[in-house]
Every structure is written in C-alpha cells, then in structure tokens.
Image: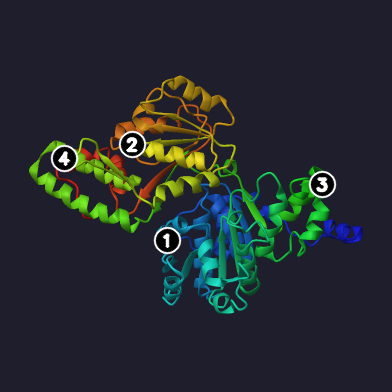
Amino acid sequence: MISKKAVKDFLAEQKLQNLTWIKKLRRAKLRELAKKYKLKFYNPSYKHQIASTILGVKHNHLLLFLDMGLGKTKIVLDIIMHRKANKQIKKTLILVPNVISINSWGDEVKKHSNLICIELYGTKTERLDKLKNAGDIYILNYGGLQSLLATAKGGKKVVDKDISWFSNMFDLIVWDEIHSSGCKNRKTLTWKISNQLSKKVKYRYGLTGTPFGKNPIDLWAQFFLIDRGEALSSAISLYREAFFTQKYNPFTYNDWVFNPKMEGILNKKILHSSIRYAESEALDLPDKVYIKYKMKFPEENFKYHRIVVERLIEDLKTKNLQKIENTFMALRQISAGFLKVKHEDEEEATIIDFKNNPKLNAIEELLLEIPEDEKIVIFNEFIKSGDMISETLEKININYVRLYSKTKDKELAKDTFLNNPECRVFLANSQSAALALNLQLSRYCIFYESPVSPIVRQQAEKRVHRAGSKKRVFYYDLIIKQSIDAKILKYIKEGEDLFNALIENKVDLRN
C-alpha cells in the first residue's frame, strides 16, 4: 500500500525540467544552438527536426512523440552520427516492430547517414553470425530480440540469466514504435528484456507518434525504459496511485482508470523526458508527403520473378503485344503477392497465392501506426489484390467499404465511408475510383499497387488532395525491392507509362 505522503511528495516534486522551451526558439536561434553543439545535418532539416535533434544531443535519454511523417528516423540518425563523431558511442542498437521495419530502417540509414548498417534478420544462428560483422548500427525486430535473449523454461519463455554479452556490445539503444510490441506493458517478455538492456546502456531513445490509446497507464513502462523513473517514478504502483482510480471489473478483476483532474500534472511530468510535435506544429512542411514503404522480396516470390523477367525480355524481341502485356501483368501480380497461370490445355487459370506477402503485412502495420480517428484510402489494381486486402482488413477487425467493378452501389460505398465514423478504410480499384470522387475527408492514402499510367495515378491522388485541403496528405507506396514497383514510380515521376516505355525498349529490366 502506497502512503498518501509518498503520493503527495511525488506529485509536488519540483526538480523536473520542461523541454518545451525549445519550441519557443526561432529558426535562427536553433541554428545558433546547433552550431554550439557542433551539430552537422546529413540532409536538410525542418525546424522541429533541428529542435528535436538538439534535445537529443543535450540529453542522454529522450522520448520523441512526433506524429507520422515528421521525420523521427532522420532525427535519431542525426543524433547517432553526432555522438559517434564525438566518440561518445561506437555501436547502436535499433529495435523495431517487425522484419519489414528492419528493411525500412536499413533504407533510411543509407538515405540519411553515412553509417554502416547491419540488418539482423533470419534464424537465431544467422542473427548471431551477423552480430559479428563490423557496423555502426544494428537493426533487430522485437521478435528477434526474444529469440536471442530468452529461453524456454517451464512451458514459457524467460529472459536469459546473463544477457550482458549483448548489452555490452552497444552504447546507444533506440526503441522504435515504443508503444507497441510489448514495450508498453512491464509484464511482457519484450519489456523485461528491454529493461535489462536499459540498465546497462547509457544513451536511450524512444520513438512513437501515439504513446497511448485511451488510457495513459501505458506511459509508465515506456518512460521507465528511457529515463529509469525520473519522470513517472521508478515504481508503477506510485504512478497508479497518483493518477488513477482502481475500479472493479468482473472480467479483468481491477481496472486502473485515469483521473481526468490529474491531466495537467501528468503533462508536466511527461515533459521532463519527452518532446511532442503534432503535425499542426510543423508548419514549414510541404502539403504533400510521399513515403516509399520498401520491403524485401521473399525468396519464393523472387524465383518466379526472375523467370518472368527473362520471359518478358524474350517476348519484347517478338514484338507480340498480347504476349508482352500478359507477361508484364504477371510481373505486377508477383509483386502483389500472387500469380495467375493459364496453361494451353486448361480452360481456367490457376492462381498461385504466395505464402509470404510483405505488402499485406505492411497494410496491417500502417493501420496500427496511423491514428485510429483518421480515415484511410487504399488503392489497388487487381481484383485479386482487393480480395486479399479485404481478407486482411477483416482479420484485424477494420471496418471498410470496397469500390470496384462488382460494387453495385458506388454512391452508397462512398457515402458510408464519408459519413459513418466506424468505417475507417475505403478500399478502391484505382480505375474505378480515380475519377469524380471527393475523398478529401481522408489524408492518408496507400497505393498497394500504383497505376501504371501517370494520368490515372494523378487522378487517384487528387481524390484525397483537392483545392481547399487544410492538412497535409500522406501518400504511401508499398514497394517490393527489385520488383517492377520502383520502375513504375520512376516512369510516373517522369510522366511516362512504364508499359509504353517497355514497348519502346527504354527499360532495362535486369537492373
């Protein structure tokens, strides 16, 4: 039982700092401070990024609560490069939610730094082997963390007795999407391992745009990993007693419900170890943000891809337009996660569903990352792709409407999306929905597959970004590396149709 005096003393603590002072500074003053700390930016930075980076080098631990699209990754990489240049660190560990995120971070490291990156994926043995490689940054997903540092005991997994061999390797740790993958719950295996690492590693940073949902009980576990109890106490029991009321629930026994009267005090506590930037505060950002969400080609899918590329090269020599189109479509299908095969002696085509579909995993990840109160438009090209996305949305209990050739009442689909707060996703075939629809209510748009035609792509984008838009729109392109996806975007940017470019022999398919 926590005494009333202990709670009172905790709430009255005066030693806490308030990091929002940096938001009041103008750009010129921020640049002055950056010069004082000898900060060098690998790529140009926006005002909020400069401010966050300054805090990151000024403090050994920090939580960055920045909305999606505000560049948390770049900020952290600038901090890491600064500390490495000043010989404060040698190796950094970045923990991410899943394998897709490993690949995405690897791309960002190349884009925003000159650091050597080691991507730790595969079996436990393969990860251990990769740890031996010389690098500056090592990227590991939370599942891989458990694989390396936990063993089965008594029917469940427990943290290894000695994980110092691992923690001693690193001087800095970043927890990406710290609100997910068990880091918000001190009882999970991920949190217990992270806690052991947090004790040993000097520099600690946490990243997320959504630190909690409806109940701020989740904050304690995240803050403790980063600041070891400075802001919200080293004891969760004290934190609960100070800010929550315990209520009986027949299903969960006891719930800790936040006391809204304590909101102001909690905000002050939080500001000791974190900086928050909402999208509305980053006013110098452009009104459109394009994000390439890159994923590795699964080996099985890539085998088919290589075969079809060689076939397309041969087809182009024959100048048989129908053959070229069919083979080109096959390449696009493989990237989408399936392949339609029709043999001469068969009346109907057979559809091969690839077991590993990174794009569907990316859809799940993005829907968890995008704020729950935001509506999302997902564009796809193939009916089969729409079917697969529909199954994924149903699996994760996301309400949606679908617009494609088989939709009987297109107006009803649109109205449901726009007017029903429970309907979160508008799943649309880009050919059906690229024209005459105003979906401006949504500012998050995902292209599962991009249209090949730059005109259709432009019209699809306009569905969510129109005259009078007051907020930035985020466009996500799901791209399988080494696939046809990147080439489509390249030719769209240049105002050309990739298929037409193929016919004119402008495209090198092997690169």
Label drawn at residue 382? 2
Identify the secondary structure beneath mark 3.
strand
N-terminal-most mark, 4 or 1 = 1
Identify the secondary structure beneath mark 2.
loop
Q: Is residue 271 left or right of residue 404?
A: right
Q: How far apart are the two marked residues, 4 and 3, measured between alpha carbons?
A: 68 Å
N-terminal-most mark, 4 or 3 = 3
Residue drawn at (83%, 55%), measured in percent from left and top?
A: 241
Image coordinates for residue 162, horizontal then vertical, percent: 61, 79
**Badges 2 and 3: C-beta atoms under 8 Å apart?**
no
Question: Disc 3 marks which residue?
Answer: 247
Q: Residues within 10 Å of mark 3 (few under 14, many from 20)?
A: few
Q: Nearer the viewer, mark 4 or mark 3?
A: 4
N-terminal-most mark, 4 or 2 = 4
Q: Amino acid at mark 3?
A: Lys
Image coordinates for residue 97, horizontal then vertical, percent: 52, 57
Q: Amino acid at mark 2?
A: Phe
Q: How far apart are the two marked residues, 3 and 1, measured between alpha carbons?
A: 45 Å
Residue drawn at (46%, 25%), measured in percent from left and top?
A: 438
Q: Amino acid at mark 1?
A: Gly
Q: Nearer the viewer, mark 2 or mark 1?
A: 2
Question: Disc 4 marks which residue?
Answer: 345
When asked about the image quadrant of residue 170, the answer is bottom right
Image coordinates for residue 361, horizontal then vertical, percent: 45, 49
Q: Residues within 10 Å of mark 2 (few under 14, many from 20)?
A: some
In depth, the one of 113 and 131 nearer the eye is 131
Question: Disc 1 marks which residue?
Answer: 106
Image coordinates for residue 430, horizontal then vertical, percent: 36, 32
Q: Is residue 465 left or right of residue 340?
A: right
Q: Nearer the viewer, mark 4 or mark 2?
A: 4
Quadrant location of the N terminus in the rendered image: bottom right
